[in-house]
Amino acid sequence: MPQPFLTAEWRYLAMLNYVADPKLLAPLVPAGTELDFDSGKTFVSVVGFLFLDTRVMGLPIPFHRSFEELNLRFYVRRKAAEGWRRGVTFVRELVPRHAIAFVAQKFYDEPYSAAALRHRIQRGSDFLTVEYQWRLRNAWETLGMTATGEPRESAAGSHEEFITEHYWGYTARRSKGTSEYAVEHPRWRFWPAETWRLEADLAALYGERFVGTLSAEPASAFIAEGSRILVRPRATELA
């Protein structure tokens, strides 16, 4: 087994999930994959989370070990010899360090860019508040959620399982083909969000094509607890 490319902890994933028209996503589906459906619907998710104790090829990078990420993703799958590989692909990913964005672009062709980000996490005995902010055009924008109680296990076949339990990443490469890489982590517990807010210039952040979808009422909102994760080196290009 090759050495992992990246190890880290992903924590407090605020996941805001919207039903999307398959025709909207079809032009963005990486070659060799197809859209994945949950109960006959396709979804996009705005996700904010913490990257902690990040190591590349086993080495900690000074000043780049802990940071925030915000992304817009949707869900695809690929038929492999052992069966379906369920994965995600990204529309845009924001991180606060140019070096992080450069590495992701260089080695995985991921659509990363750098922006100022910050977060606020408050967890008490019976409540949780999660807030991620990013600066766009000199204004701070926000993804925030609140929850109460203890995190839950996702049931087999549930919507929460569909959103959280994808273990492959797919990227349409600048050259012909698609990158495939494995992401390993245990099943995540989650808190259903009691309140949520997304305050952003959606056209500037993700393009006009997503404004209608992301302006609608979300299908679900929850906070995934997260865990330690491992990202394998990307595979050779898929057809």
Image: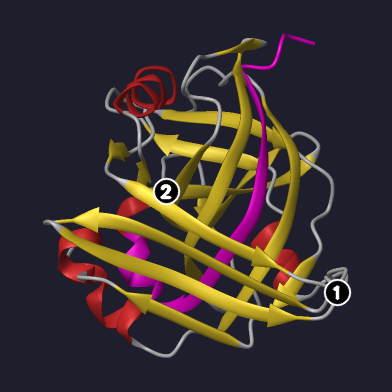
- How far apart are the alpha carbons under marks 2 and 1? 30 Å
> Is 15 left or right of 128, judged from the image as shown?
left
On the image, numbered disc 2 is attached to which residue?
90
Up-down relation of residue 211 to residue 189 (above or below): below
**Mark 1 residue type:** Glu
Q: Position of residue 197 (x, y in %)?
A: 43, 81
Secondary structure beneath dot 1 equals loop
- The residue sitting at 85% across, 74% down in the picture is 150
Front residue of this view, candidates 12 and 24: 12
- Labels 2, 1: front one: 1
- The x and y percentages for residue 235 are 57, 20
The image shows residue 69, relative to residue 224, as above or below, that is above
Inspect the magenta stretch and tell me whether residue 135 lies in it.
Answer: no
Query: Left or right: where does residue 93 sit relative to residue 187?
Result: left
Vertical side of 153 occupied by 83: above or below: above
Picture coordinates of residue 239 (x, y %)? 45, 29
The residue where tag 1 is placed is: 150
**Magenta span contains residue 12:** yes
Q: Nearer the viewer, residue 57 or 89?
A: 57
Q: Position of residue 182 (x, y in %)?
A: 67, 32
What's drawn in magenta, residue-wise?
1-26
